[in-house]
Amino acid sequence: MKNVAQVNQYLADLSVWNVKLHNLHFNVVGPQFKSIHEYLESVYDVAFDYFDAVAEAVKMAGQFPLVNSKEYAALSKIEELGQVDIPQAQVIEILLNDFKYMKDQALAIRSAASEEDHFALSNMMEDHVEYYVKQIWFIESMLK
């Protein structure tokens, strides 16, 4: 796997994003608390599954995935949040921005994996992109 650094970046982003999604889940406030709270649970479940699958893909390619929280925090480009109530509109905007970022990361990995005929990783990223695109559509539809 030639793009192991790029994949480890994505792995770090998934790890930090998973924690951030839990923060949003715990701290969202507003009239739609229940539905957003439950939606966030479904998103962080997917993010964790992706985290696990990506780490295993790196290992199956004969490389070592990042497995250190300190390295995740240093490498990730996902912005963490503090311990505050987060209004539902802000939660939705944060989610939209993070989904767009994660989609771009998955697209870049898919492209690099395709170039080196790493079809398993390319296909995995295709699935991730499909999920992110659908979530972006859901959120953008909510904002209309």
Image (tube, rainbow, N blue to C red):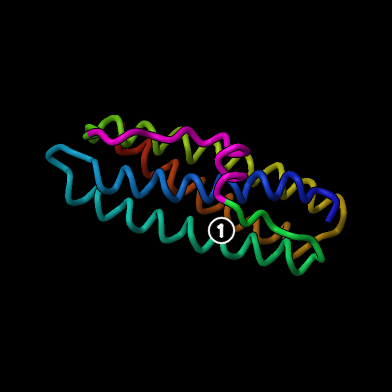
Residue 123 x/y as whole percent:
69, 61
Taking depth in this image into account, of 141 and 23 the one nearest to the observer is 23
For the point 33% across and 56% down, the residue is 41
Q: Of all residues shown, which one is farthest toward the left?
A: 31
Tell me which corner region of the image, top left, top right, bottom left or bottom right, holds residue 9: top right
Residue 90 position (above or below residue 49): above
For the point 36% across and 31% down, the residue is 93
Residue 112 position (above or below residue 97): below
What's drawn in magenta, residue-wise?
69-84
Residue 1 left/right relative to 69: right
Residue 45 left/right relative to 89: right
Residue 2 x/y as whole percent:
85, 51
Taking depth in this image into account, of 122 and 15 the one nearest to the observer is 15
Q: What residue type is labelled 1?
A: Phe
Q: Number of callouts in the render?
A: 1
The secondary element bearing badge 1 is classed as helix
For the point 47% across and 45% down, the residue is 17
Q: In which quarter of the image is the C terminus?
A: top left
Few, some or many residues within 10 Å of mark 1 (<14, 14–19, 20+): many
Residue 124 x/y as whole percent:
65, 60
Taking depth in this image into account, of 111 and 12 the one nearest to the observer is 12
Residue 132 position (above or below residue 98): below
Q: Quadrant of the N terminus?
A: bottom right
Residue 75 left/right relative to 39: right
Would you say residue 91 sits in the magenta stretch?
no
Residue 88 x/y as whole percent:
23, 35
Would you say residue 81 sits in the magenta stretch?
yes
Residue pointed to by mark 1? 51
Tell me which corner region of the image, top left, top right, bottom left or bottom right, holds residue 125: bottom right
For the point 79% across and 61% down, the residue is 63
